[in-house]
Structures are given as C-alpha cells and as structure tokens.
C-alpha cells in the first residue's frame, strides 16, 4: 500500500478490508479537512468508508474495560455536500449497542433512546475514530456535539482499540 494516498482516486481504489487501522490512521492524518470533505462529496465512497469504519468498531471493541456497561451510542455523521446550508447536508446515523461484553453496530436510527449521541462532520469523525484528534479537544472546540451522558462520551476511547498514527 502506498504511504501517500491523498486523492479521491487513491482513496476510492483502496480495498478497505485490507487496510489496517494503523494504515487508515496514517492516511487520515495525511488529509486536510477540506480534502476529506471533498472525498465525502462522492456519496458512494463516503458510504463505503463509513460502513468500514463502523464495522471495525465491533472488532476493535475492548470488552474488559467495558465490564457490565449497557449503553446505546448514536453516531450522527454529517456531510456538508459543498455548502454551509444545513438543508444540503446528508446525515448518516449508526448506533453502537454495548451490552454483555459485546458491541453491535447497526446502520440507521432505531426507536430506542440512546444514552449518548455524538454528532459531527465527516472530517472530524474520521480524525476522531482514527486517533488523529483528541475527543476532549474536539468537544472544547465544538467540533463534536454531545447529547446525553457526557461522561460516557468522554470515556469511549477506553472501550475501543484506537490506533496511534
């Protein structure tokens, strides 16, 4: 795999299942927020990236630190679609259910009430889940909006094996 994947075409050509979390973190680290937003304008590519990231969430879950935690975490990832107007934004929702030492991720919004909801744009989401941005810093800079249990949100990195870029 090339270490310099910084174009939409380079990202689009990746077999995400063959990219390790560490490699993905390096790819994201090399991209500016503007480049990520440009990649996210390709709705098919955006969907592939989000699907892979959330599938990995289940595999990177650490059951020991979670212990008996029971929580539904709702993730809302918003794509700017080229404008600042909120009506032109595409929101993708995934939910991570943590229970009995497992994490199960599903696409879409359920009728269940989440314990915490995290909402952010594409670039901030990828920087967060790839370990390229501090969740506390993102919250302080209002790059991530948290509704519900802020303490749970602050501790999420304990429950997942997040790569170190």
Image (spheres, rainbow, N blue to C red):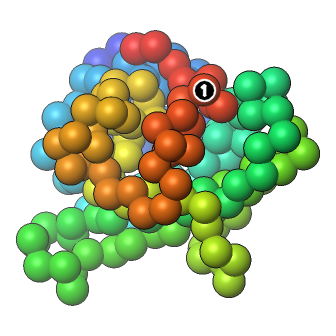
Given residues 98 and 107, the one toward you in this image is: 98
The percent position of residue 142, horizontal first and vertical second, equals 21, 50
Residue tagged 1: 158
Location of residue 110 by image quarter: bottom right
Whether residue 138 is situated above or below residue 91 in the rendered picture: above
Whether residue 164 is situated above or below residue 158 in the rendered picture: above
Residue appearing at x 29%, y 19% in the figure? 4
Residue appearing at x 70%, y 55% in the figure? 71
Given residues 68 and 133, the one toward you in this image is: 68
Observer able to see residue 54: yes
Residue appearing at x 60%, y 26% in the figure? 158
Q: Which quadrant holds the C terminus?
A: top left
The percent position of residue 24, horizontal first and vertical second, equals 46, 27
The percent position of residue 119, horizontal first and vertical second, equals 38, 60
Residue appearing at x 52%, y 54% in the figure? 149
Location of residue 134 by image quarter: top left
Residue at the extreme right: 100
Whether residue 118 is situated above or below residue 7 in the rendered picture: below
Observer able to see residue 7: no
**Secondary structure of residue under mark 1:** helix
Given residues 8 and 129, the one toward you in this image is: 129
Whether residue 69 is situated above or below residue 45 in the rendered picture: above
The percent position of residue 101, horizontal first and vertical second, equals 86, 39
Question: Horizontally, is 131 left or right of 127 in the view?
Answer: right
């Amino acid at each position: 795999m090339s270490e310099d994947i910084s174009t939409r075409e380079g990202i689009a050509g990746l077999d995400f299942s063959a990219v390790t979390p560490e490699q993905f973190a390096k790819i994201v680290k090399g991209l500016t927020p503007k480049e990520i937003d440009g990649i996210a304008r390709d709705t098919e590519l955006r969907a592939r990236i989000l699907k892979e990231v959330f599938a990995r969430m289940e595999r990177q879950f650490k059951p020991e630190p979670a212990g008996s935690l029971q929580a539904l975490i709702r993730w809302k990832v918003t794509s700017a679609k080229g404008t600042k107007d909120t009506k032109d934004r595409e929101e993708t929702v995934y939910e991570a259910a943590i229970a009995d030492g497992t994490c199960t991720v599903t696409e879409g919004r359920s009728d269940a009430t989440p314990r915490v909801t995290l909402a952010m744009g594409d670039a901030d989401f990828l920087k967060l889940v790839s370990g390229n941005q501090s969740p506390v810093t993102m919250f302080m800079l209002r790059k991530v909006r948290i509704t519900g249990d802020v303490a749970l949100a602050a501790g999420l990195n304990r429950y997942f094996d997040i790569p170190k870029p």
